[in-house]
Image (spheres, rainbow, N blue to C red):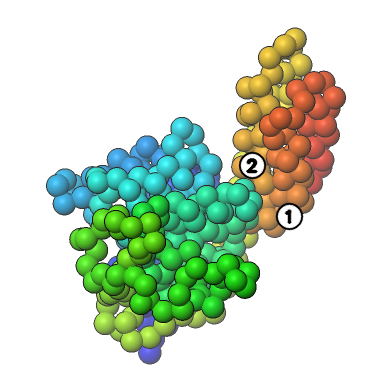
Amino acid sequence: MSKDKQENLGQDRLSILVIEDNEYMLDVFANALKRMGFTRMFKAKTGKEAVEYLRSTTKSFAASEQVDIVISDLIMSPISGQLVLQWLRDDKASPNRFMPFIMISGAADRVNVEAARDRGVSEFMAKPFSVENVYKVLQRLIDNPRQFITTQTYFGPDRRRSSKAGPPMGTERRKPDESHGTVVYSKDRIEKPKAPSDVWFFKLPNYLKQKMGSNAARQPFVLPFDVLESAESALKREAEGFIDWAKKYLDRLSAQVADAKQRAGERTSNFEEINLIAHELRGQGGTFGYPLITVFAKSLYDVTKPPCPHDDAMLEIVKAHIDTMRAVIR
């Protein structure tokens, strides 16, 4: 078998929508996917743009190519990744309520992960990311997709990957089999069960495998090591662009500090922007070989969370973080 055939296992037939409000990171992530053979790509810079594109792929419009997988940043304004996910799972205008959805974020705190799971996310991936991380998540989606379930309060992939996993002994309400639920074999029938204890299990074919072709259905999705190694090396080479990007974000932080010092009173907007920029830096440093940027940006993100003080002493703490990060990339 030739190298080209080994690399192309049908992943080039899958369409992926990537949503990221940071244009630099949007291009970096899309390039990483393309190097793994996922060449059918659609990019959206805002949640609003993503929803509009997804809406255009429905049967009633059919103006755009169907999307098979959504990969979205979590923290975006005004429409966040959580809101895009909620629309996809719940809205009647959604092109496919069963569509795999991967959430990515530097704020992979437990509260954000659990909130995404409760909205019906398929996978949650933390930033900074590596090619290997992205590959393993996509591999799970393709080879072992989560079964969808619906109750009176939830619709989405089963939030437990294994039937063996569960709460402490004596508190498990779920039965080891599916005898307590209704098995559904069509995704056209999505209704809320009548009783609070009722649950529906959707037994659906593996759509991603089907679209990838007959060969994909007969074997696991495994990319050659040299393909992943080459993609990882290319990601590291993009560090030069990261330095320029990071310097611009540090300049924005300095501008917020300077502006806040000129204000005698209300500084809320300054600290909100500082916290948002820190979140962006937190998620990117480790991806490009600057783990200390991630460490110090996370520290800045944590200390500027509400209800942090908005006084001059806190501004000096912010400035110290900025100076330290400048020294790292100098």
Query: In the displayed structure, does residue 61 sit left or right of residue 16?
Result: left
Does residue 207 appear in the picture of this structure? no
The residue tagged 2 is 279
Give the total of numbered labels: 2
Residue at 72% from the left image edge and 11% from the top image edge = 265
Q: Residues within 10 Å of mark 2 (few under 14, many from 20)?
A: many
Query: In the displayed structure, does residue 277 sit left or right of residue 193?
Result: right
Which of the two residues, 171 or 235, is positioned nearer the viewer here?
171
Which of the two residues, 84 or 149, is positioned nearer the viewer here?
149
Query: In the displayed structure, does residue 202 sit left or right of residue 316?
Result: left
Does residue 279 appear in the picture of this structure? yes
- In the picture, the disc for residue 164 is none
Front position among marks 1 and 2: 2
Which of the two residues, 194 or 235, is positioned nearer the viewer here?
194
Choose top left, top right, bottom left or bottom right for residue 164: bottom right
Tag 1 secondary structure: helix
**Percent position of residue 41, x then y:** 36, 56
Residue at 44% from the left image edge and 61% from the top image edge = 122
The residue tagged 1 is 291
In this view, 182 is above or below 22:
below
In the image, what residue type sits under mark 1?
A: Pro
In this view, 125 is above or below 56:
below
- Estimate the spatial distance between the alpha carbons at disc 1 and disc 2, rounded to whole Å: 14 Å
In the picture as drawn, the residue positioned furthest to the bottom comes out as: 1
Q: Earlier in the sequence, mark 1 or mark 2?
A: 2
Choose top left, top right, bottom left or bottom right for residue 204: bottom left
Q: Residues within 10 Å of mark 1 (few under 14, many from 20)?
A: some
In the image, what residue type sits under mark 2?
A: His
Which image quarter holds the C terminus? top right
**Percent position of residue 213, x then y:** 27, 77
Residue at 33% from the left image edge and 86% from the top image edge = 218
